[in-house]
Amino acid sequence: MKNKLTEPKFRFHFRLARHLFGAAVIFLWVGPSGAAQPLMVTGGGTGTFYVDLDGDGEIDGSHFGFAVIQNPAKVVGHFMCQMAGNKDMLGLKLMLVEGQVSSAFFAPDSVTFSGTGSVNLANGTKFTDVPFTVTVTAGGPGVGTLQLTVIGLFDGVPGDTIPGDNNYSLPVETVETGSISIQ
Ligand SMILES: [Ca+2]
Ligand SMILES: [Ca+2]
């Protein structure tokens, strides 16, 4: 009999593998033909906020996986971040933000990218066409960071750092396992 607690983690690793494979395919595809070096940011692992955001007695964090490539002509990429299993939030079995990335800004020490996707709460509630913005810095455990803002939803819900702006701005999350890489 399967242990239900392991399923979200398994699904996460499956998704991550799929995303990284997709990124590799994109990279190989654009690699030989592009004269200019593409800028790329990738990440996968778990993060922690170091605080209990929803007051359930457990420090909160997320599982994340993403790959974004800026070519001369356009930005391609995918982002997912989920709170489930050992990273549950607000009593929900799942809070999954997932979508395509369509723009990116590569600063010297960070990358901010944006896109549109879905927010799945796994209780029959799924929001689609939701804009999101993510800012990341590179590094492994205790060094890399990720900050996710969901636009137009959940304003003022526990975890929102800027009440009243119509968006859900999660605090900066620090890499706990895995890493974020900017190349
Ligand atoms: Ca908590
Ligand atoms: Ca807000």
Image: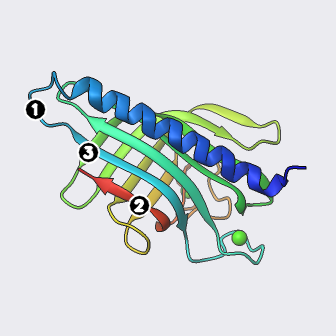
The secondary structure type at the circle numbered 1 is loop
Colouring convention used in this rendered image of the protein: rainbow
Number of disc labels: 3
What amino acid is at disc 1? Ala
How far separated are the C-alphas under marks 3 and 1? Answer: 16 Å
Q: Going by the image, does 170 lie left or right of 143?
A: right
- Give the residue at mark 3: 105
For the residues carrying marks 3 and 2, which lies nearer the camera in this image? 2
Q: Going by the image, does 56 lie left or right of 50?
A: right
Q: Tell me which numbered mark, 1 or 2, is placed earlier along the sequence.
A: 1
- Contact between marks 1 and 2 (CB within 8 A): the answer is no
Q: Which mark is residue 179?
A: 2
Residue 122, horizontal then vertical, whole percent = 77, 42
What amino acid is at disc 2? Ser
The secondary structure type at the circle numbered 2 is strand
How far separated are the C-alphas under marks 3 and 2? Answer: 20 Å
What amino acid is at disc 3? Phe
Look at the picture and state if 43 lies above or below 21.
below
> Can residue 123 be seen?
yes
Q: Residue at x 84, y 55 (%)?
A: 3
Q: Going by the image, does 66 lie left or right of 62?
A: left
- Quarter of the rendered image showing ligand 1: bottom right
Residue 114, horizontal then vertical, whole percent = 40, 40
How far separated are the C-alphas under marks 1 and 2? Answer: 26 Å
For the residues carrying marks 3 and 1, which lies nearer the camera in this image? 1
- Give the residue at mark 1: 36
- Which residue sits furthest left? 35
| Residue placed most toward the observer, 60 or 133 | 60
Crowding at label 2, few (<14), some or many (≥20) Cα neighbours within 10 Å?
many
Residue 60, horizontal then vertical, whole percent = 64, 69
